[in-house]
Amino acid sequence: MFFFFVGGLEQQVRQVLKSGAGKCKNCGSRADLVDYEKVLKLFFVPVWRWPGKEPLMHCPDCFLFFPPPTRTGPLLDVLRCASCGRPVESNFRFCPFCGSAL
């Protein structure tokens, strides 16, 4: 007896949260911030859906899902060591990384 299985798991856009929120990493066109869901399909018929964990960026041109860019700026209210520049807790008197006095 021979069984032929056709199925798969794919991501689909559930809701657009912000249109044109960034640029696609793959093709460079505009990308949207979306809520997505994962869909299990058997013989091309959706069988089970469950929501994604965090919003993702989605390019409608090349259908790529990718994480949104993170902001990498200086953190406010963070004490940094004058010698090595690493962040330390405000109640420390010495840097735990290089040992210099704060």
Image (cartoon, helix red, strand yellow):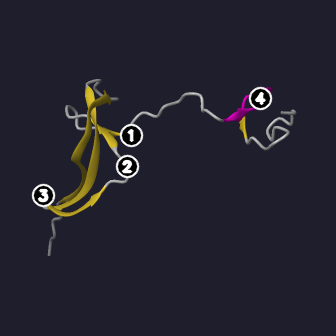
Element on which disc 4 rests: loop
Tell us which disc is closer to us: 3 or 2.
Answer: 2
| Residue in the picture at 20% in, 34% down | 60
**Residue at mark 3:** 44
Q: Which disc number belongs to residue 26?
A: none
Highlighted range, magenta: 78-86
- At mark 2, the secondary structure is loop
Rendering coords of residue 1 (x, y %): 14, 76
Query: Crowdedness of circle 2 by 10 Å Cα count: few (<14), some, many (20+)?
Result: few
* Pointer 4 with pointer 2, Cβ within 8 A: no
Tag 1 and tag 2, C-beta contact below 8 Å:
yes
Q: Residues within 10 Å of mark 4 (few under 14, many from 20)?
A: few
Label 4 to label 1, Cα distance in Å?
Answer: 31 Å
Could you tell me residue 96's position as x and y percent?
81, 41
Q: Which tag is nearer the camera, tag 1 or tag 2? A: 2
Q: CA separation, marks 4 and 2?
A: 34 Å
Q: Is residue 78 left or right of residue 33?
A: right
Labels 3 and 2: the sequence-earlier one: 3
User: Which mark lies nearer to you, 1 or 3?
Assistant: 1
To which quarter of the image does residue 27 belong?
top left
Q: Residue furthest top?
A: 28
Q: Is residue 85 magenta?
A: yes
Q: Amino acid at mark 1?
A: Pro
Q: What residue sits right under mark 1 in the picture? A: 67
